[in-house]
Image: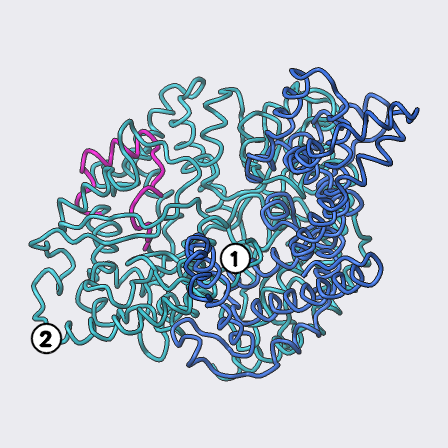
Chain colours: A cyan, B blue
Amino acid sequence: MRKSVAYVLVGIMGMSMLLTGCSGQKEAEKSVEHEKTEAETTPYGKYEETVVYTVGKNTPGSPRFPEGDDYENNAYTRYMLEELNIQNKNEFEAATGDAYNQKVSMAIATGKIPDVMMVDRTTLKQLVDNDMIADLTESYEQCASDRIKEMYDSYGGRALDMATFDGKLMALPSTACDNVPTFLWIRQDWIDEVGMDAPATLDDLEKILTAFRDKDPGNNGAGKTIPLAISRSIGGSYGALFQADNIMAIFGSYPRQWLKDESGNVFYGSTSDETKEALGFLADWYKKKLIDPQIAVRDDIESTIVNGQCGAFFGPWWAPDYPLNDARKVDEKADWRPYIISGKGDGAITAYTQNPASEYYVVRKEFEHPEILPKIASLLCDKLVYEDYNYEPIVAYNKANVDSGVKPVGILVNYSTATSDMYERIQKAIDGKLDPEELNIDDYSQYLKCSDYLKHPDEPSPDEWSGYMSRMVGAKLMYETEVTGVDPVYFGQTRSMKLKWANLNKLEDEAFIKIVTGEEPVDYFDTFVSTWKSTGGDSIVAEVEEEIAQQ
Amino acid sequence: MKKKRMAGQAGYHAMLMPGMIFLIIFNVVPMFGILMAFEDYLPAKGIFHSAWVGLENFKYMLEIPDSMIILRNTLIIAIGKIVLGTIVPICFALLLNEIRNKLMKKGIQTVVYLPHFLSWAVLAAIVVNIFDYNGPINSLIQSMGHDPILFLGSNTWFRKILIGTDVWKEFGYGSIVYLAALTGIDPGLHEAAAIDGANRFQRLRHITLPGIMPIIMLMVAMNLGNILNAGFDQVFNLYNPIVYETGDIIDTYVYRVGLLGQQYSFATAIGLLKSIVGCTLLLSANGFAKKFANMQIF
């Protein structure tokens, strides 16, 4: 049976493609004669009949729904039904990350994709090649609000360029507002317990982690404390949780990024000498048991943080919302604080910047209402935020810390400077320099949490703590830190990557984790680099150079 | 005459139909998918319109070191499972057969069947906990004064754990057929041997084992068909990048590269390699069986 599974999938794929191929043509003919209504040509025009659209939903780590609500029926879906008369039906729901990506891959393989879904850049390319998604150029022109267009334009066109193929806009990207630098989040109460000072350099951090390991400030039992948690991918995911990027950047290593060296040659960050050095450093920490000994098999780092086993991790400014909010609910003494770890201890750091388009939302080709996507983006990222900010159900959601990832379509469009703007506005409102009533919906609910926190800073509720720690402490640290940006030069997918990239990725994942865990010596890195180059890396580097030269 | 025979067998043919239809839909029709291995397959264009690339996917397969690694892993794991998965149930059935207390016999039988009915998604969680740093096995090792071992992240242990846990899961269920065969042995033979002074072990060796030998051969033959199925669901739920070197098998590789990496053509090429190797092994096993044991599987 099992052996036939692969063939069966292949067969189903083939057959369904033949079938959808035929039906697709018919629908295309039908839509030609269709006269467009007002709802179909304006951002906020309401449909006369409810439009039901299917969604591939990537779900957040902990949604925290109020009783009775779910992904198809919550404050956001009701708001959208009320405003635009649209209702989502979820084709599949899966946790953001591998689980969701697997569902998407399966959906594409079987040729049955939902009407609206989120994909990464590689998958977007695949969908375009396969002619499975709708051209959004016209819908964007007509149905995106002026402010949405202004937001995309604040990235100087780079955001939409990433979603444009042959002059056609094939997806709407979420914009990645500044999420770097990430910083060290560490248990301040543990630092106090072992009687040490706040860390500023890697040496300081090593001493603190050693004390965590030896003195067991969390009373977890000998050997059960995880001083520092790191993801088993080690590094290279922009602005994500549990990456070692902060440490690696001190060595000048920017893994998984396409960069240019001083003489202008393109190279892949994972294969640089600096990366070798950084991995060697991490391997030393692993050997000293400062890094989670089970890093290779750890699937759920969050739970070690929530149950008080873990002492430190690297993460972005929003870490207090997730996963630390849950940690506070379990132990309200868990005093997580952010610190900048820099090479010289002066707080000046380097970090690689990111493609302004972080994820892409696409519409299925045959779907009758491709304009639904720009309409949703306008409604959720403009109208709700700037006009309907007093909309009670959603203000209540934000106060109760319901994850904003429960929106049926999680598209996020914002100005390039959104995070620091947010910090500035909330700070002004708290200082009384700005009327809180003028804040937009996200900022207003966070302002309420922060001001509640300040009323009783010694015993805040977990939600008040999260609001204050992320918006006022985390975002402030990010805003004030001096960052030298290293700009990657390429984000796309070259010709050979299609066949060879998955395998090179595997090689990379394997080499990183093996070196860090000491399964292979640091010099194994050289073997990895030469295999990487000979099995396609070299030709891909050449192609990247070629594509950059053409730009 | 002929017509009459057909009429008599119509019922049997009808019973055969569902199986045949199943076989055609799931095993014969998808065969056309093999074409994908020679194409740069795009789902939108379909199997018949994608660009033909000839042997390019196979060339790349030979170029990368992974092909040999996954083939080797698949063979080692599958053979380990077939060998142990045959010996252990036989031994267990023989031992169980010697138990005279009916209640105890049934009790043991039921308990060892249980894991067979659980899926690997569930069992993997149990296995992960048992072999965890703070799990029972490592506690035992630590209490004896040794360092804990990260079993599932160790290339020395990973295959052994795969084979061991698979045998543990299936041996109870696998023994059913042998227990059934044991009841088919004429008790008169045992009585006669006992009168002639044969002890229990001698009776086992000369009566019981030869008695169930045909069934053993049949089961081995049937298992050989699975020789390259090292168990996708088990490996998939237990592995991680560190043990790709010893634990990554053809099926998991095809899944990762083909369905997650969306390289349908390359994955099909690898899958085809699996079929070719499997077919060769099966034919040679049949040849050997015919030559040395004078038994033919098909």
- In this rendering, is residue A400 above or below A142? above
Query: Amino acid under label 2?
Result: Glu
Q: Quadrant of residue A398?
A: top left
Give me the chain letter of mark 1: A
Residue B30: x and y in percent read 48, 67
User: Horizontally, is B258 left or right of A126 in the view?
Assistant: right
State the residue in front, B31 or B179: B179
Q: Which residue is mark 1?
A: A5
State the residue in front, A120 or A291: A120
Tell me which segment is drawn in magenta. Answer: A386-413
Graded by Cα atoms within 10 Å as few (under 14), some (14 to 19) or many (20 or more), the crowding at tag 2 reads: few
Graded by Cα atoms within 10 Å as few (under 14), some (14 to 19) or many (20 or more), the crowding at tag 1 reads: some
- Residue furthest toward the right? B197
Label 2 vs 1, first from the N-terminus: 1
Query: Amino acid under label 1?
Result: Val
**Element type where label 1 sits in the image:** helix
**Element type where label 2 sits in the image:** loop
Q: Residue at x 7, y 63 (%)?
A: A38
Q: Which residue is mark 2?
A: A33
Residue A338: x and y in percent read 54, 36
- In this rendering, is residue A486 above or below A199? below
Q: Is residue A198 magenta?
A: no
